[in-house]
Image (cartoon, rainbow, N blue to C red):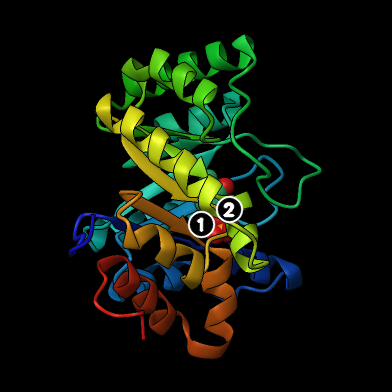
Amino acid sequence: MSGLNMSARLGVNIDHVATLRQARGEAYPSVKKAAEVSIDHGADQITIHLRGDRRHIQDYDVDAVHEVVKEKNSLLNFEIGATREMILKAKALKPDWVCLVPEKREERTTEGGLNLGDPKVVENLKIACEEIKESSPLTKISLFVESDQKTMDTVISIKQVIDAIEIHTGEYAIDVNKNHEIKHHLDQYLVAKKMIEGEGLGFHAGHGLTDVSLKYLADIDLFSEYNIGHWIIAQSVFDGLGTTVRKLKNIIQKNSSGE
Ligand code: PXP
Protein backbone atom coordinates (compact mmCIF):
# COMPACT_ATOMS: atom_id res chain seq x y z
CA MET A 1 0.00 0.00 0.00
CA SER A 2 2.76 2.44 -0.81
CA GLY A 3 3.26 4.91 -3.60
CA LEU A 4 2.07 8.41 -4.34
CA ASN A 5 -1.44 8.91 -3.02
CA MET A 6 -2.48 11.93 -5.05
CA SER A 7 -6.11 11.56 -4.21
CA ALA A 8 -6.12 12.12 -0.44
CA ARG A 9 -7.38 15.59 0.40
CA LEU A 10 -6.26 17.98 3.11
CA GLY A 11 -9.07 19.96 4.73
CA VAL A 12 -7.80 22.84 6.84
CA ASN A 13 -10.05 23.64 9.77
CA ILE A 14 -9.73 27.37 10.51
CA ASP A 15 -12.07 27.57 13.53
CA HIS A 16 -9.06 28.23 15.73
CA VAL A 17 -8.27 31.45 13.88
CA ALA A 18 -11.74 32.65 14.85
CA THR A 19 -11.13 31.49 18.44
CA LEU A 20 -8.11 33.80 18.61
CA ARG A 21 -10.11 36.69 17.19
CA GLN A 22 -13.09 36.14 19.51
CA ALA A 23 -10.78 36.04 22.56
CA ARG A 24 -10.23 39.79 22.15
CA GLY A 25 -13.31 40.84 20.22
CA GLU A 26 -11.09 42.38 17.52
CA ALA A 27 -11.37 42.06 13.74
CA TYR A 28 -8.05 40.18 13.51
CA PRO A 29 -6.75 37.61 12.73
CA SER A 30 -8.79 37.37 9.55
CA VAL A 31 -10.61 34.08 9.02
CA LYS A 32 -11.05 34.97 5.35
CA LYS A 33 -7.30 35.47 4.93
CA ALA A 34 -6.64 32.14 6.70
CA ALA A 35 -8.81 30.45 4.09
CA GLU A 36 -6.98 32.20 1.24
CA VAL A 37 -3.49 31.37 2.55
CA SER A 38 -4.46 27.73 3.25
CA ILE A 39 -5.82 27.21 -0.26
CA ASP A 40 -2.82 28.97 -1.82
CA HIS A 41 -0.49 26.57 0.03
CA GLY A 42 -2.15 23.29 -0.84
CA ALA A 43 -5.36 22.90 1.19
CA ASP A 44 -7.94 21.03 -0.88
CA GLN A 45 -10.82 22.32 1.21
CA ILE A 46 -11.62 24.62 4.08
CA THR A 47 -13.48 23.20 7.06
CA ILE A 48 -15.44 25.41 9.44
CA HIS A 49 -17.70 24.44 12.33
CA LEU A 50 -20.56 26.85 13.01
CA ARG A 51 -21.49 25.99 16.58
CA GLY A 52 -24.83 26.81 18.16
CA ASP A 53 -23.08 28.97 20.78
CA ARG A 54 -21.01 30.81 18.10
CA ARG A 55 -17.89 30.45 20.23
CA HIS A 56 -15.54 30.81 17.26
CA ILE A 57 -16.88 30.90 13.68
CA GLN A 58 -19.61 33.56 13.22
CA ASP A 59 -22.33 33.63 10.57
CA TYR A 60 -20.46 36.33 8.62
CA ASP A 61 -17.35 34.10 8.51
CA VAL A 62 -19.35 31.35 6.83
CA ASP A 63 -20.37 33.69 3.99
CA ALA A 64 -16.87 35.18 3.65
CA VAL A 65 -15.16 31.77 3.55
CA HIS A 66 -17.73 30.43 1.11
CA GLU A 67 -16.93 33.34 -1.23
CA VAL A 68 -13.18 32.62 -0.99
CA VAL A 69 -13.53 28.90 -1.76
CA LYS A 70 -15.77 29.66 -4.73
CA GLU A 71 -13.33 32.28 -6.09
CA LYS A 72 -10.41 29.88 -5.69
CA ASN A 73 -12.22 26.82 -7.01
CA SER A 74 -11.78 25.03 -3.72
CA LEU A 75 -14.27 23.23 -1.48
CA LEU A 76 -16.17 24.18 1.67
CA ASN A 77 -16.79 21.54 4.32
CA PHE A 78 -19.47 22.93 6.65
CA GLU A 79 -19.50 21.16 10.02
CA ILE A 80 -22.71 21.41 12.00
CA GLY A 81 -24.81 19.72 14.64
CA ALA A 82 -28.02 18.25 13.22
CA THR A 83 -30.22 20.96 14.81
CA ARG A 84 -33.09 22.74 13.07
CA GLU A 85 -31.14 26.00 13.02
CA MET A 86 -28.09 24.44 11.37
CA ILE A 87 -30.03 22.35 8.88
CA LEU A 88 -31.72 25.54 7.67
CA LYS A 89 -28.30 27.21 7.39
CA ALA A 90 -26.92 24.31 5.34
CA LYS A 91 -29.94 24.35 3.04
CA ALA A 92 -29.44 28.06 2.37
CA LEU A 93 -25.64 27.88 2.05
CA LYS A 94 -25.44 24.83 -0.22
CA PRO A 95 -21.79 24.03 0.61
CA ASP A 96 -19.77 21.32 -1.16
CA TRP A 97 -19.84 19.17 1.97
CA VAL A 98 -21.80 19.07 5.20
CA CYS A 99 -20.23 17.12 8.06
CA LEU A 100 -22.75 16.30 10.78
CA VAL A 101 -21.19 16.21 14.24
CA PRO A 102 -22.43 15.82 17.82
CA GLU A 103 -22.43 19.06 19.76
CA LYS A 104 -22.58 19.66 23.49
CA ARG A 105 -22.51 23.15 24.91
CA GLU A 106 -20.17 22.33 27.78
CA GLU A 107 -17.51 20.52 25.71
CA ARG A 108 -14.18 22.15 24.94
CA THR A 109 -14.18 20.65 21.43
CA THR A 110 -16.06 17.85 19.66
CA GLU A 111 -15.33 14.98 22.03
CA GLY A 112 -16.26 11.94 19.97
CA GLY A 113 -18.33 10.64 17.11
CA LEU A 114 -22.11 10.73 16.79
CA ASN A 115 -23.98 8.38 19.12
CA LEU A 116 -25.28 5.95 16.52
CA GLY A 117 -26.20 3.46 19.24
CA ASP A 118 -29.34 5.53 19.83
CA PRO A 119 -32.01 4.83 17.17
CA LYS A 120 -33.51 8.29 17.73
CA VAL A 121 -30.18 9.92 16.87
CA VAL A 122 -29.91 7.77 13.72
CA GLU A 123 -33.45 8.64 12.65
CA ASN A 124 -32.86 12.36 13.26
CA LEU A 125 -29.65 12.22 11.20
CA LYS A 126 -31.38 10.39 8.38
CA ILE A 127 -34.13 13.00 8.22
CA ALA A 128 -31.53 15.81 8.35
CA CYS A 129 -29.55 14.27 5.47
CA GLU A 130 -32.67 13.78 3.35
CA GLU A 131 -33.76 17.36 3.98
CA ILE A 132 -30.36 18.81 3.05
CA LYS A 133 -30.09 16.62 -0.07
CA GLU A 134 -33.58 17.58 -1.18
CA SER A 135 -32.86 21.32 -1.23
CA SER A 136 -29.18 21.01 -2.21
CA PRO A 137 -28.66 17.84 -4.27
CA LEU A 138 -25.01 18.65 -5.03
CA THR A 139 -24.04 18.92 -1.37
CA LYS A 140 -22.27 15.79 -0.14
CA ILE A 141 -22.76 14.66 3.44
CA SER A 142 -20.42 12.96 5.88
CA LEU A 143 -21.10 11.73 9.41
CA PHE A 144 -18.47 12.15 12.14
CA VAL A 145 -18.32 8.74 13.84
CA GLU A 146 -16.25 6.26 15.84
CA SER A 147 -14.69 3.36 13.94
CA ASP A 148 -16.10 0.32 15.80
CA GLN A 149 -17.89 -2.47 13.97
CA LYS A 150 -21.37 -1.68 15.33
CA THR A 151 -21.08 1.94 14.22
CA MET A 152 -19.96 0.82 10.76
CA ASP A 153 -23.00 -1.48 10.48
CA THR A 154 -25.32 1.39 11.42
CA VAL A 155 -23.65 3.77 8.98
CA ILE A 156 -24.04 1.23 6.19
CA SER A 157 -27.75 0.84 7.04
CA ILE A 158 -28.24 4.53 6.10
CA LYS A 159 -25.74 4.66 3.26
CA GLN A 160 -28.38 5.91 0.79
CA VAL A 161 -28.46 9.34 2.46
CA ILE A 162 -24.72 9.92 2.96
CA ASP A 163 -21.56 10.14 0.85
CA ALA A 164 -18.83 9.53 3.41
CA ILE A 165 -17.97 9.13 7.06
CA GLU A 166 -15.30 10.99 8.97
CA ILE A 167 -13.65 8.85 11.61
CA HIS A 168 -12.96 10.52 14.96
CA THR A 169 -9.19 10.12 15.29
CA GLY A 170 -8.92 11.94 18.65
CA GLU A 171 -7.97 8.95 20.79
CA TYR A 172 -5.53 7.60 18.22
CA ALA A 173 -3.85 11.03 18.00
CA ILE A 174 -3.53 11.28 21.80
CA ASP A 175 -1.93 7.82 21.89
CA VAL A 176 0.59 8.95 19.26
CA ASN A 177 1.35 12.10 21.28
CA LYS A 178 1.96 9.98 24.40
CA ASN A 179 4.07 7.39 22.56
CA HIS A 180 1.51 4.71 23.39
CA GLU A 181 0.73 1.61 21.33
CA ILE A 182 -1.35 2.52 18.25
CA LYS A 183 -1.63 -0.79 16.39
CA HIS A 184 -5.16 -1.48 17.68
CA HIS A 185 -6.34 1.87 16.28
CA LEU A 186 -4.80 1.19 12.87
CA ASP A 187 -6.21 -2.34 12.77
CA GLN A 188 -9.70 -1.07 13.56
CA TYR A 189 -9.41 1.69 10.93
CA LEU A 190 -8.34 -0.87 8.31
CA VAL A 191 -11.36 -3.08 9.01
CA ALA A 192 -13.68 -0.06 8.90
CA LYS A 193 -12.07 1.21 5.68
CA LYS A 194 -12.72 -2.10 3.92
CA MET A 195 -16.38 -2.09 4.96
CA ILE A 196 -17.03 1.56 4.13
CA GLU A 197 -15.16 1.78 0.84
CA GLY A 198 -16.73 -1.54 -0.16
CA GLU A 199 -20.09 0.24 0.07
CA GLY A 200 -18.87 3.07 -2.15
CA LEU A 201 -18.64 5.62 0.70
CA GLY A 202 -15.74 7.99 1.34
CA PHE A 203 -13.50 7.28 4.34
CA HIS A 204 -12.30 10.51 5.99
CA ALA A 205 -10.42 11.32 9.19
CA GLY A 206 -10.29 14.20 11.62
CA HIS A 207 -9.59 15.42 15.11
CA GLY A 208 -6.40 15.91 17.03
CA LEU A 209 -4.07 15.05 14.16
CA THR A 210 -0.51 16.40 14.03
CA ASP A 211 2.28 16.02 11.48
CA VAL A 212 3.36 12.77 13.18
CA SER A 213 -0.06 11.16 13.64
CA LEU A 214 -1.01 12.19 10.10
CA LYS A 215 2.11 10.59 8.62
CA TYR A 216 1.40 7.13 10.07
CA LEU A 217 -2.06 7.20 8.45
CA ALA A 218 -0.98 8.72 5.14
CA ASP A 219 1.92 6.26 4.79
CA ILE A 220 -0.53 3.35 4.53
CA ASP A 221 -3.12 5.29 2.48
CA LEU A 222 -5.73 4.85 5.20
CA PHE A 223 -8.02 7.77 4.51
CA SER A 224 -9.04 9.75 1.43
CA GLU A 225 -9.43 13.01 3.37
CA TYR A 226 -7.89 14.50 6.52
CA ASN A 227 -9.43 17.47 8.33
CA ILE A 228 -6.91 19.14 10.59
CA GLY A 229 -7.12 22.39 12.53
CA HIS A 230 -5.71 22.84 16.00
CA TRP A 231 -2.18 21.58 15.30
CA ILE A 232 -1.95 23.63 12.09
CA ILE A 233 -2.90 26.88 13.79
CA ALA A 234 -0.69 26.13 16.80
CA GLN A 235 2.32 25.30 14.60
CA SER A 236 1.69 28.41 12.52
CA VAL A 237 2.79 30.52 15.50
CA PHE A 238 6.33 29.33 14.75
CA ASP A 239 6.33 28.52 11.03
CA GLY A 240 3.51 30.55 9.53
CA LEU A 241 0.24 29.21 8.16
CA GLY A 242 1.36 28.71 4.56
CA THR A 243 4.48 26.73 5.49
CA THR A 244 2.55 24.56 7.93
CA VAL A 245 -0.23 23.74 5.45
CA ARG A 246 2.35 22.93 2.75
CA LYS A 247 4.19 20.63 5.16
CA LEU A 248 1.04 18.59 5.85
CA LYS A 249 0.14 18.48 2.18
CA ASN A 250 3.60 17.11 1.44
CA ILE A 251 3.14 14.41 4.08
CA ILE A 252 -0.15 13.37 2.47
CA GLN A 253 1.44 13.33 -0.97
CA LYS A 254 4.49 11.53 0.43
CA ASN A 255 6.75 14.02 -1.29
CA SER A 256 8.94 14.05 1.80
CA SER A 257 8.68 13.94 5.57
CA GLY A 258 6.97 17.28 5.13
CA GLU A 259 9.99 19.57 5.34
N1 PXP B 1 -13.17 17.11 12.06
C1 PXP B 1 -14.19 17.33 12.91
C2 PXP B 1 -15.49 16.67 12.63
C3 PXP B 1 -14.04 18.20 14.02
O1 PXP B 1 -15.08 18.40 14.85
C4 PXP B 1 -12.80 18.85 14.20
C5 PXP B 1 -12.65 19.83 15.32
O2 PXP B 1 -13.47 20.93 15.10
C6 PXP B 1 -11.78 18.59 13.29
C7 PXP B 1 -11.98 17.70 12.24
C8 PXP B 1 -10.43 19.24 13.43
O3 PXP B 1 -9.87 18.82 14.65
P1 PXP B 1 -8.55 19.48 15.20
O4 PXP B 1 -8.82 20.94 15.33
O5 PXP B 1 -8.34 18.79 16.50
O6 PXP B 1 -7.48 19.21 14.20
- Element on which disc 1 rests: helix
Task: Identify which residue is drawn at 60% across, 76% down.
Answer: 234
Above-or-below relation of 107 to 250: above
Left or right, 178 with respect to 215, comes to right
Badge 2 is on which residue?
A: 172
Badge 1 is on which residue?
A: 61
Asked whether the residues under the numbered discs 1 and 2 touch, taking CB atoms below 8 Å apart as contact, a structural biologist would say no
x then y, percent, for residue 52: 67, 39
Neighbours of disc 1 within 10 Å: few (<14), some (14-19), many (20+): some
Task: Identify which residue is drawn at 74% across, 37% down.
Answer: 104
Front position in the image: 66 or 200: 200
Q: Earlier in the sequence, mark 1 or mark 2?
A: 1
Extreme residue toward the right, this view: 106
Label 1 vs label 2, nearer the camera: 2
Let me know if residue 163 appears in the view.
no
Q: Is mark 2 within 8 Å of ligand 1?
A: no
x then y, percent, for residue 11: 39, 57
Above-or-below relation of 78 to 200: below
Q: Quadrant of residue 153?
A: top left
- Element on which disc 2 rests: helix
Left or right, 247 with respect to 229, comes to left
Gap between marks 1 and 2, in whole Å?
31 Å
Q: Quadrant of residue 83?
A: top right
Task: Identify which residue is drawn at 54% across, 11% down.
Answer: 123
Let me know if residue 10 appears in the view.
yes
Front position in the image: 166 or 24: 166
Query: What amino acid type is highlighted by mark number 2?
Result: Tyr
Left or right, 95 with respect to 210, comes to left
Above-or-below relation of 170 to 212: above
Neighbours of disc 2 within 10 Å: few (<14), some (14-19), many (20+): many
Query: What amino acid type is highlighted by mark number 1?
Result: Asp
Extreme residue toward the bottom, this view: 238
